[in-house]
Image: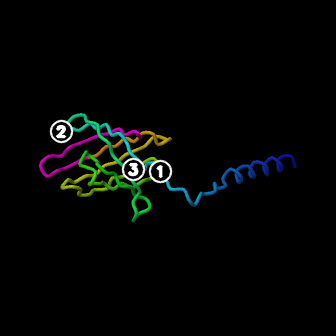
Amino acid sequence: MKYRILAFLAISLVVISCEDEPVDPDFDLRDEYVGDWLCNENSSIYGNSSYTITIEKSDTNETYIHISNFYNLGNAIAVSAEVFDNSLLIPAQNVGGNAIDGTGTSNADYTEINLTYTVDDGADNDVCSAVCTPL
């Protein structure tokens, strides 16, 4: 009898601990990325530089963000990236005459984004890394 009670308690704990957390219907993970960021970039062609990027949510895709002034190309030019919690995917795209693709990660509290990407302008293939912090 004692073992049945212990078994029942053990199974109950497993069932209780496996319950899903309620999901806030208004939560949008992309909100963690939205805003102005200081981008400290290391380029294999241009060396080190710092500039500001602006991240906004896509109006047409609920998992994408747009990064303006990416690669310091100007505020009128934006790169799209897909958000997967603390990971970003910059799918291959042609932006401002440049073929761009890469990946990124953010830390747990979204106060730093680390990006690795390539930019091919048709003549040179620039391999870059950047650390971005919110302004």
Disc marking residue 38: none
Residue depicted at x 41% and y 48%: 35
The residue closer to the viewer here, 76 or 87, is: 76
- Mark 2 Cα-neighbour bin, 10 Å: few <14, some 14–19, many ≥20: few
**Which residue lies most toward the bottom here?**
60
Between residue 111 and residue 90, name the one nearer to us: 111
Q: Which residue is mark 3?
A: 88
| Circle 1 residue | 85
Q: Say whether disc 1 or disc 2 marks the residue closer to the N-terminus.
A: 2
State the mark number for residue 45.
2
Amino acid type at circle 2 is Ile
The verdict on residue 126 being magenta is yes
Q: Place residue 59 in its image quadrant.
A: bottom left
Residue at position x 79%, y 49% in the image: 9
Looking at the rendering, which quadrant does residue 132 occupy? top left
Amino acid type, residue under disc 1 in the picture: Asp
Residue positioned 63% across, 54% down in the render: 21
First to last magenta residue range: 118-135
- Please tell me whether residue 46 is drawn above or below residue 35 in the rendered image: above
- Measured Cα–Cα span from mark 3 to mark 1: 8 Å
Q: Residues within 10 Å of mark 3 (few under 14, many from 20)?
A: many
